[in-house]
Amino acid sequence: MMSEDLKREAARSALAEVKPGMRLGLGTGSTAWHFVDLLGIEVAKGFDVLCVPTSEKTAKQASELGIPLTDLEATPELDLTIDGADEIGPGLALIKGGGGALLREKIVAAASGRMIVIADQSKCVDVLGRFPLPVEVNIFGQGATERAIRRVMEDFEAEGDLRPRLTSDGKPFVTDGGHHVVDAFFGRISRPEALSAALLEIAGVVQHGLFLSLCRRAYVAGADGITTLDA
Ligand SMILES: O=C(CO)[C@H](O)[C@H](O)COP(=O)(O)O
């Protein structure tokens, strides 16, 4: 199966968890795109859900499909969030934010009773950190924030550097919240909880892409079908 087919199969498994009347968080990225697309087909047939998107991109896709949308002001508690991931590690610890939506993704996941991740097998790792960890930073004082992040990277024996994320035309990548993203190349993250705490201690760090103790289930699609991983 091609990678897009695998993503769609994982999305289809997650769709089976969605019951009528649920309040859902909708993730961001190419795998979440398939979930939203499949949900749109059900909504067109009359399926009842109310959704909070985790990015402007997902909001646009969902509204074009006629999926009813709300926000966390009107609906502060959700039943379930379905999202993709950049890495799935032991205990379903995740790295997210490759698409730059990590802040809204984490807020929405934290407001949800459950988070389910959908992915193809390539995302599963024994140790997190091969995928660069996205860190969302306030634009004010970014130089000082980067310096502080580099110090934390040294403390955690990062194998690589910190790189400000740029768009394809070389401009700083700006998140939906108006912040920048810097990508931290760790190679191996052996103490994710401690790293999370150290990064959040930095004043200019808005959020980072380590999702710890948030995801309870993953549907992972591979050549042999779907594997269900539970935390
Ligand atoms: O965290 C994300 C966006 O911020 C995505 O979920 C993550 O990057 C995975 O994306 P894809 O399904 O395209 O591989």
Image (cartoon, grey):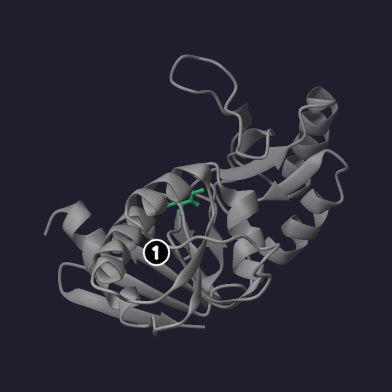
Q: Which residue in the protein does label 1 denote?
A: 124
The quarter of the displayed image where residue 139 is located: top right
Q: Give, as a three-letter code, the residue at label 1.
A: Cys
The quarter of the displayed image where residue 32 is located: bottom left
Q: Would you place residue 144 above or below residue 55 in this image?
A: above
Write the residue at 72% across / 42% down.
Answer: 153
| 210 left or right, relative to 65 | right
Write the residue at 18% across / 75% down.
Answer: 225
Q: Would you place residue 36 above or below residue 13 in this image?
A: above
Q: Position of residue 43 (x, y in %)?
A: 31, 69
Write the residue at 56% across / 16% down.
Answer: 171
The quarter of the displayed image where residue 190 is located: bottom right
Q: Position of residue 115 (x, y in %)?
A: 52, 74
Q: Would you place residue 174 above or below residue 132 in this image?
A: above
Query: Looking at the image, can residue 191 be seen?
Result: no
Residue sitting farthest toward the left: 1
Which quadrant holds the N terminus? bottom left
| 12 left or right, relative to 73 | left
Write the residue at 51% across / 73% down.
Answer: 92
Q: Would you place residue 173 above or below residue 216 in this image?
A: above
Q: Position of residue 48 (x, y in %)?
A: 39, 77
Query: CB at mark 1 closer than 8 A to ligand 1?
Result: no
Q: Position of residue 111 (x, y in %)?
A: 66, 71
Badge 1 crowding class, 10 Å Cα cut-off, few under 14, some 14 to 19, many 20 or more, is: some
SS of the residue at dot 1?
Answer: loop
Query: Looking at the image, can residue 103 be seen?
Result: yes
User: Which of these two is toward me, 133 or 3?
Assistant: 3
